[in-house]
Image (cartoon, rainbow, N blue to C red):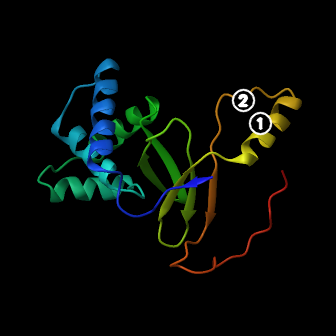
Amino acid sequence: MKVGSPGPRATETEASRWVAATEAALRRAGGRSTAARRGILRLLDAAASGMSAEELLLALGAAGLPAARSTVYRPLDTLREIGAVETVHPNPEHHRYLARRSAHQHHLVCEVCGTVTTFDGCELEDEVIAAAVATGFRVRRHTLEILGSCAECGPPAIATEPAAV
């Protein structure tokens, strides 16, 4: 298992590649390049733990690009549709949007501070997919979010029972 860091984002070159590839995918999908959309891409690119729509809205305003909520949510929907961002859920009321830098990644999500650590690969996924296929279920895609608390936040406030697989 390769675990990513919740700290600063990828190198400048890797980051520039994600923004450029995402802008190209948006153009192919018929999207216009607007200042707000470019701002959203730059903000998501720089946020290793992702950002909520509200954080994006505030950050755009602080950068001199005041925007309406629809100006943030509409591009986020499009970015999810083209596979450029993923959504994680630190709690049921909040969503964080993260730049998707690899075709297959999973997340450790701190329910206390919202830090998201991305990791590639998972031995468990082969077993889960095999179990699904054995029941006749056709897997289209899957996600794995492990919720808890990061090292800085300490033990989770509520202990949970292990889920039956």
- Judge depth for marks 2 and 1 and give the one in front: 1
- Residue at 29 percent across and 25 percent down: it is 24
Can you see residue 92?
no
Image location of residue 83, percent across then percent down: 46, 33
Q: Position of residue 19 (x, y in %)?
A: 29, 38
Residue appearing at x 22%, y 45% in the figure = 39
Indicate the quadrant where residue 29 lies: top left
The amino acid type found where label 1 is placed reads Ile
Point out the tag, 2 or 1, that comes first from the N-terminus: 1
Residue 129 bears which disc, if any? 1
Q: Residue at x 46, y 61 (%)?
A: 5
The kind of residue on which mark 2 rests is Val
Q: Residues within 10 Å of mark 2 (few under 14, many from 20)?
A: few
Place of residue 126 in the rendered image (x, y in percent of width and height, measured from the top left)? 76, 39
- In 3D space, how far apart are the residues under numbered discs 2 and 1 (Cα atoms)? 7 Å
Q: Residue 31 has which mark?
A: none
Q: Is residue 122 above or below residue 37?
A: below
Residue 93 vertical placement versus 120 (above, below): below
Q: Residue at x 33, y 32 (%)?
A: 22
Q: In this rendering, would 133 be left or right of 121? A: right
For disc 2, the marked residue is: 139
Tag 2 and tag 1, C-beta contact below 8 Å: yes
